[in-house]
Each structure stands twice: as structure tokens, then as C-alpha cells.
Amino acid sequence: MNFQALTLPEKLDQLFVFVQHWIMGFFPAHWQPLVGALVGVVGIVASFPAIFALTTVLERKGLGRMQNRLGPNRVGPLGIFQPVADGIKSLTKEDIVPVSADGVVHFLAPVVLVVAIFLGYASLPIGRNMVLVNIDAGLLFFFAVGASTELSIFMAGWSSRNKYSLLGAMRAVAQMISYEVPLLMSAIVAVMMTGSLSTVKIVEAQSGFTGIFPHWYVFTPWGFAGFVLFVIAALAETNRTPFDLPEGESELVAGYFTEYSGFKFALFFLGEYLGMMSIAGFGITLFLGGWGAPFSFLNFIPSWAWFFLKLLAALCFFIWLRGTLPRLRQDQLMNFAWKFMLPMTLLNLMVAAAWRFLGDSATGAWLRWVLCAGVLLLAYVGLGRVLMRKQRLGARSYRYAE
Amino acid sequence: MIFGLSIAFWITALFTVAGALAAALLKNLVHCALSLTVTFAGLAILFLQLDAQFAGFAQMLVYIGAVAILVVFAILLTRGAGAPEYRIYTSSWLAGIAIAAAVFALLAWSVITSLPAGAGSAAPDVTVLSIGQALMSTYVLPLEIVAVVLTVALIGAVIVAMHDKGDAKTHEQKGGAQ
């Protein structure tokens, strides 16, 4: 590709790709693949923690608004330099390791967590031609790497030699294993429709437009159901509210990272938000058209800008949920995973297969819309009714201290 | 390149073997399980170096994501994870070494003899796509049977774990009588 021959929007779109090639040009041909990969890694390792810093301010200010208070407003104008202060604080704070703790495992746990989560970004398409490694099984890679974060959380909880830590870790692992099944199953519908596990191909399959509206998977019955299920499972997988039982402050101090302080605690914090961003990024890739523009006339805005805008919207949604929903109970959590999420994801697979084979001829298109949406709605209502009947919910009773 | 093998291979091989040795030699059971996980990860990376993406990712997903967690849970739920008081080496270590060597020799012999006559023949191009297609067409019956077996195992586990209300009561009464 020649940089000069492109129009301005195309130039902006491929800006980072050309910067990478420009840097690679300074090195002999033998070194170029290595340097190119290194530049990509530096880009990811620099940009996502920067978004993390931004998110912490956004979350604290946003939650403050929702709870009718101000939030951080002392460091810099409107408190926007709060992450800098937090960073300096966590770097200079004393690193306390309990006497009875298992030193090596205690040290390794946050490192393993952050490394495993960073690895997941390797197959995330951030923009057109902007993916670190474009492999056939990119999605499988993300889920495979994501599975190893459970072990690091267990390591943290076990090595602390603290009952609250261990309880938190056990809760976290049980929850993550339970919700990993619906997470994978809800992602599979997008793979079935694309016919590929490659994240790049999944985005490309959604890049067309009908009129001004895009062909995102979320605008189909199975895609919408899959997206909702994916978001719920993703919330549980990242231990976000309403699934934040592993670190339930009111009962477990801080769950699996109770005994961590200083920069190790900051690493857990970073890992949690990076995990949230990567899973949101994959949700965007699978169902929300990846780096594609939401309307055809907005195509002039660079693809990476769309990706990051969608990511910010997803993060705001997560923050909003945190300010809105109460925490679930352990039995509710498990019942919901196995009795609602799993049957719904299985049914969604069937619906997606039916959609695929009903074809998109003039009559088939209407028929499959009505049929697929009807089946999913019926299952949702029916399953909800049956499960709620067993709950025997009465009027809520309030008790006050006298 | 050392002995015709890449540096990446040597590093992974070192980690894999070190993890396996640590799993056999460490005293704390949870440490053993964690170092076994290092071996699993090393094997996955070795698969990836051979361009066997599906095997590598399945290794990660199944062994690190599920088997390692299962091992760790089993240790925690059964006998506690403290260092054992008794010796970890049994008195029959000589027989153990002999059996291990015999198994290794058998495996090595079968691997060496199964090499194709023309050692320089091109490696088959197996992509994730072709594995998927083979599983869904030629090998669909074995796949379904495996799925049924796994479902049966799952239901069996739930039934074993599920406690009858009447049963629990009698149990409590017995405990009370004692």
C-alpha cells in the first residue's frame, strides 16, 4: 500500500499501521517481524492501561453522581489527575506480605493474572488491519488464555493463608467456571454464522450495510439473545456487580486480594479492569460489528476510533450497572447460571442453526424472523415463569433497629 | 539454533521438564499442582510451535482451565494443603524408577518406529477448520458418543452430590444418638 495514494480518511484509518511499518523500516529485513510485533505489543501495553486510568476516574465520578455525592475532586481540575495520585500512592506504599503466607505463590499470583489477561489482547482486532496476531483460531485463543486467570485468582487466595482470601478465591473460581460455559456457548453463534474462529473474519462478516444500517449480529434474534447472554456471562466472568461475590466487601473484607497491598494490589485492580476491557472488546467484535461504523455515512471516521468509542460505551454501561444493581446471593448466582443461562444458550444455538438453514429468500426472511424471535421470547418467558414460581417470592419485609 | 532446534523450543522444553520435575519432587501438594500447570502450559506452547493450534488451545482450555483447577480443588477438599509429616518418597522407589524407565522406553520406541520412512516428507496442513469439518462429517458418530458419555458423567456427578432430604435427616439423628 502506498501512503500517498490514499484519501485523508483512509490515511487516518491506517495511521497506526503506517507508523508501525515506518518504525520497521529502520531495521534490517531479518529483524522486521520481531520489531513489528514489539511495536504492536508496546501499543497495546501502553494504550489499554491508559484507558484503565481514565476508567477509574470515570467510574468514581460516575458512581459519585449516581450516589448523590461529588466523587474525587481534589487532584487537578475536576479531579482528573486522581489516577496519577493513585499510581504514586500504590508505588510508594509498603508491600506487606503476611508471615504465614506462601511467599513465591503470593508474589506470582498478580503477575500471572496480568500477563494472562494481556495475552488475550493479542487476537483482538482494534481497527482495520490492526490485530497483533491474526490466527485462524483467534477466538479460541482468547478463551484458552482467559481460562488461566482462574488459577491465578486461586493462587492469590490460597497463598494468603487467610480464611477470607480462600473463601473469596473459592467463590471466584466456582463462579468463573460456571459462567465460562454460557460465555463460550453464547459466543459460538457468531462463529456458526461466520464459519470461522478468526476474530478478523467475524468482524469482516458484519461489515456490510443495508441502506444506512449495518449488518451487526446483534440486529438478529439469535444475535440479540446471544449478546445479552454474553454480557451477563462477561459480567460474571470479570466479577463485576451484580456478580461481585468473590470480593463482597460486606462479608469477605476484599475477597481473594485481602492480603495484598501496594503495587500488587494495584496489579489486581489493573487486571480486573483489563479483563473487563478485553471481554467487552470481544463482545464488540462478536456482536457489535467490531471496528465498523454504526451508519454507512459515518464511515469516514477511522475504524480504531469506532472501536474505542464502543469500548468506552461498554465501560460506561458496566459502571452504570454497578451503580444500579444489588449483589446476588451465592445460590441465586448458581441457579441462574445452570437453570437459566445454560438452557437459553443451548436453545440459542438451535435457533441460530434454524436461521442459517431457513435461508434468506423473500418469504424465508420473514418466516425466520418471526420463528426465531418467537421461540426465543417464548423460552425466555416460560423459563422465567417456571424458575420464579419456585422462588416463592413474597412481599419484601423491612426490619429496622429500634 | 542448538542441535537443529530453535531457542524458543529449548526455553519451552526447559520450563516443561522443570515443571514436571517440581511436580514430582516438591513437598507441598498445592505447589506440585501449580508446577504441573507449568508443564501443561509448556506442552500447549510446544503444540503451538508445531503449528497445531487446535491441540495447543484445547490443551490450555482443558488442562489449565479445568483439570488444574479440579486437581487443586480435590487437594483442598480432601486432606488439607499443608506440608505432609511423613516422607514423600516411598521405600519402593527403585521399582518405581524401573517401571517409569520401562514406560518411557516403550513410548520412545513406538514414537521412533512410527516415523515415516521418508523423514523429509512435508508436514500435513491441518487447520482448525479442517479439524472442525472432520469432526462434523467423518467422525460425527464418535463425537456424539463422547458427548453422551460426558453428559451421563455430569448427571451422575449431580446425583451423587445431591443429598436426599430424608436421608440427611436420618443421618443427623444417628449423629445425635451418638
Image: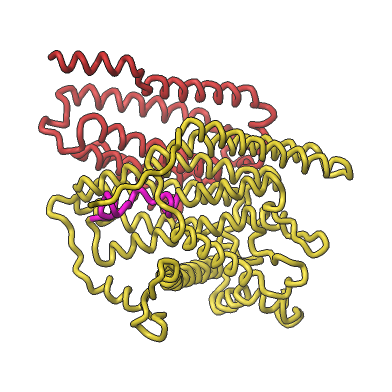
* Residue A381 in picture, x, y percent from top left: 61, 37
Query: Which residue is the extreme one toward the bottom?
Result: A77
Q: Is A34 placed left or right of A396 in the picture? A: right
**In the image: residue A206, left or right of residue B89:** right
| Residue A397 magenta | no
**Up/down of B70 relative to A125, above or below:** above
* Rendered view: A313 above or below A103: below
The residue lying toward the viewer, choosing from A42 and A177, is A177
Residue B15 shows in the view: no
Residue at the image point whose x is 69% and y is 78% from the top: A11
Quadrant containing the N terminus of chain B is bottom left
Residue at the front extreme, as displayed: A402
Q: Position of residue A24 (x, y in %)?
A: 56, 74
* Residue at image point 49% right, 71% down: A47
Structure colour scheme: by chain
Q: Tell me residue A55's x, y (percent).
A: 45, 69
In the rendered image, is residue B102 in sight?
yes
Q: Which residues are magenta?
A: A237-258
Instruction: Give the left or right position of residue A337, taking residue A272 as reference.
Output: right
Q: Position of residue B116 (x, y in %)?
A: 57, 32
Q: Is residue A255 magenta?
A: yes
- Color of chain B here? red
State the image quarter where residue B137 is shown: top right
- Number of marks in picture: 0
Please say if A16 is above or below B123: below
Taking the spot 18% from the left edge, 17% from the top edge, the residue there is B175
Instruction: Depth check: give the residue in front, A39 or B109.
Output: A39
As drawn, the chain in yellow is A
Residue at left offset 54%, top offset 51%: A231
